[in-house]
Amino acid sequence: KRHGYHFLAITDHNTFTDPALFDTNPNDGFLLIGGEEVTNSRTVHVNAIGISRVVAVQQGSTVTEILQASIDAIRGQGGLPLINHTNFGWAFTATEMLPLKRTALLEIASGHPLVNHGGDGRVPSTEQMWDQLLSAGVRIYAVAVDDAHNVREEFTRARANPGLGWVVVRASALTRDNVLAALGEGSFYASTGVTLKDVRSSADSLAVEI
């Protein structure tokens, strides 16, 4: 809040952070949104944004089945699923994501130093995976996250510190529903540093002010 953020979703592993316990001032221009990182031992992680209670660990015989089960459970609570760091532990690629239904968001940038977003020369970068999904007709929007694990130690490139990735939404009001709607319809941009003044599109043009 002191650093100019207007909203935040805390997504701890298999732990639901209830906004009501912490976001106690409705008039302070800051919104906490319920969240969780649905996690399993196969390193298939899906953030649940805007949920109201814990989402159980989902099972499946394949990565695609686990991803779809997680997406369905999150959607069942009216939340938005965010597929996390596909290259963390080289967990999966666009191939496993292509069959998915009711996707929403895909992490392509992170402040965590171990998620391998750039690929390794054999496994594509997460941005390339996003392009593969879009080219195949999958509607999914890209986000940046901080994936903060280190908040008390000195900030260095080797630590997962906060403030290294975020999204800016175009929303008419600072409410959970408005923020989720903007994220769900792609009315936002993701950044690790650049700030945009405006983005305008029409049937035959795109204008970006930086």
Image (cartoon, rainbow, N blue to C red):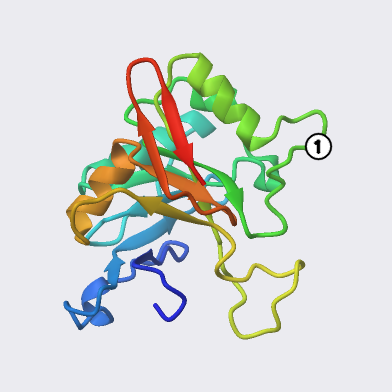
Amino acid of disc 1? Asp
x then y, percent, for residue 96: 54, 26
Q: Which residue is mark 1?
A: 120
x then y, percent, for residue 54: 30, 61
Question: In the image, is 154 to the left or to the right of 4?
Answer: right
Relative to the observer, which residue lies in front, 25 or 22? 25
Q: Residue sitting at 34 percent across and 61 percent down? A: 35
Q: Quadrant of the N terminus?
A: bottom left
Q: Is residue 133 visible?
A: yes
Q: Residue sitting at 59 percent across and 55 percent down? A: 192
Q: Residue sitting at 29 percent across and 36 percent down? A: 185
Q: Is residue 18 above or below residue 184?
A: below
Relative to the observer, which residue lies in front, 140 or 44? 140
x then y, percent, for residue 6: 34, 67
What is the total number of numbered labels drawn onto the structure image?
1
Question: In the image, is 95 to the left or to the right of 21?
Answer: right
* Residue found at the far right of this picture: 121
Q: Residue sitting at 80 percent across and 28 percent down? A: 122
Crowd band around label 1 with a 10 angstrom C-alpha radius: few (<14), some (14–19), many (20+) = few
Q: SS for tag 1?
A: loop
Question: In the image, is 48 to the left or to the right of 62?
Answer: left
Question: In the image, is 50 to the left or to the right of 153?
Answer: left
Q: Is residue 141 above or below residue 14?
A: above
Q: Is residue 203 above or below residue 161?
A: above
Relative to the observer, which residue lies in front, 42 or 202? 202
Relative to the observer, which residue lies in front, 181 or 78? 181
Q: Is residue 73 visible?
A: no
Q: Quadrant of residue 155?
A: bottom right
x then y, percent, for residue 204: 38, 15
Q: Is residue 23 above or below residue 191?
A: below
